[in-house]
Image (cartoon, rainbow, N blue to C red):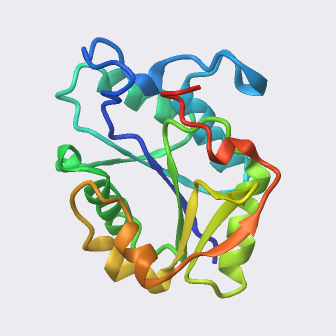
Amino acid sequence: MQPVGLLLAAGLGSRYDPSGRSLKLLQPVTTGPHAGLRIVQAAARALAAAGLQCFAVVRPLDDPHQTELHALLRGEGCELVVCEQAAAGMGSSIARGVGATEGADGWVVTLGDMPMIAPATIIGIIEALHSGHAAVAPTWQGRRGHPVGFSATCRQELMHLQGDRGARDVLAAHPPHLIEVDDPGILTDIDHS
């Protein structure tokens, strides 16, 4: 079986625009091969190019930017998973996404605001999961980045995440197998690029 892509797209991007007038994920990529695409669109396409079904975790439609975001992600072929507790943090989004995809053989968790990740990196993570690792993360020039892969053995722990620590506790219990990649996109933080 194949893992699924879990695209975390429920954040507000308050570091990017503290006023909240614009949603970071809907801004255009300005450089590189994805120039002109929306940030979240490029992130979703990397999962699809790696052969993964994409489940995008989003906020409810009561946020003014969500109608456009939901439509854009559906247009990219993503299944939407609405997280009512998105304001509680990334851990809650991961738990909601994993819970909505219980039949999955694993998850490649990617951040919606990281549009520069190469599909080859995601494929490497999938291959490492298939070889039996519980958790997998890429490194570039000695620095660990995103996305992170989890096998089905981590399901219960992922489903119980909450708050804004993301999956740190799961990664502490299951130190990730590291794969070296030629992909600086695993570190590209759109807030500072």
Q: Quadrant of the C terminus?
A: top right
Residue 3's x, y, as percent?
Answer: 58, 69
Residue visible at 62% across and 20% down in the picture: 29
* 14 horizontally vs 150: left or right: left
Residue placed most toward the observer, 184 or 21: 184
Residue 13's x, y, as percent?
Answer: 35, 29
Task: Count all numbered tags in the image, as a single digit.
Answer: 0
Residue visible at 41% across and 84% down in the picture: 173
Residue 150's x, y, as percent?
Answer: 52, 73
Residue visible at 48% across and 28% down in the picture: 191
Which quadrant would residue 151 be assigned to in this image?
bottom right
Residue 176's x, y, as percent?
Answer: 57, 76
Asked if residue 21 is positioned above or below residue 60 in the image, the reply reads above
Asked if residue 37 is positioned above or below residue 131 in the image, the reply reads above
* 1 horizontally vs 20: left or right: right
Q: Quadrant of the N terminus?
A: bottom right
